[in-house]
Image: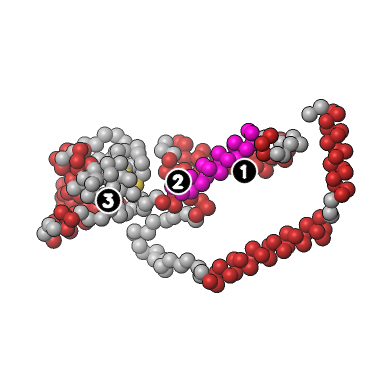
Amino acid sequence: MNRQQKEQYLREYSTLKAQGKPFFPYAVAKDGAMACVVMLAIILMSIILGAELGPKADPTTTTYTPRPEWYFFFLFELLRVIKPPELVPLATIGVPTIAMILLFLLPFYDRGPERRPERRPVAMIAGIFTIAAMGYLTYLGASAGSPTTIEAPTPARIAALPADQRQMYEQGKQVVAQSGCLACHKIGENGNDGPGPHLTDIASRLPAQGIERTLINPTAPMPSFKKLQPEQPETFRAMVMFLGELKGDEEGGGSEGG
């Protein structure tokens, strides 16, 4: 913007400002009326729909899965996407902080007079991309399965087995869910999409003996369950049995756990 354009802009601005309405009481009354409408809507929704209350808090439970509020789902999902530990502080603190600082400083570094969206392609693309990314991450965070529970249904062939084998299968499901396996693997809709492979159909690709050898002598960074075999043989067998029965087509998911 050259000097002549700036002077013309200031003249037009002064003219429009003189023709405008004062902030008080016009803008104050307008904002106050809108605030009353929003408050009334919230009160009516709380009376008609009621508040969503979950079960009473139990400090002794070991199966509780902490979940953030819905407006933090995008950050929650970002933690699941960022795998390297050294990048976690940057994703959770660095990027949101930088974005907030840039938002607060917007009036200082964006001094252009143009406000039409079609004449601000860079700002519009950046804004749309940010909103779309947050919306997509919020959706993924809201639909993510529990990281400590495997919600896949029990196959019919397992349900037809004797009671002791069914019990071993369910025990193995619980052991796998609570041993940290879902931090790197995905089973059905539960767990993380990497860095380990999907286990929804692991039994279709690897026999039980191969699964057992992998648990005892895994590839880094997967932890070894070698000590579990002699110390808790029944738990180890249950773990191998459960993983050895994951064939994907009968677990309610495809080969990619979806």
Q: Quadrant of residue 23?
A: bottom right
- Residue at the disc numbered 2: 77
- Seen from the viewer's position, the closer of residues 2 and 234 is 2
Tags 1 and 3 touching, CB below 8 Å: no
Q: Which kind of residue does numbered mark 3 sit on?
A: Gly
**Residue for point 84% across, 41% down:** 13
Residue 69 position in % (x across, y down): 49, 56
Q: Earlier in the sequence, mark 2 or mark 3?
A: 2
Q: Which numbered circle lies on residue 125?
A: none
Residue 160 visible (yes or no): yes
The residue shown at (85%, 45%) is 16
Task: Say which amino acid is labelled 1.
Answer: Met
**Image quarter hosting the N terminus:** top right
Q: Label 1 to label 3, Cα distance in Å?
A: 42 Å
Mark 2 or 3: in front is: 3
- Checking the image for residue 100, the label placed there is 1
Which residue has dot 3 on it? 252
Residue at figure coordinates x 46%, y 67% from the top left: 53
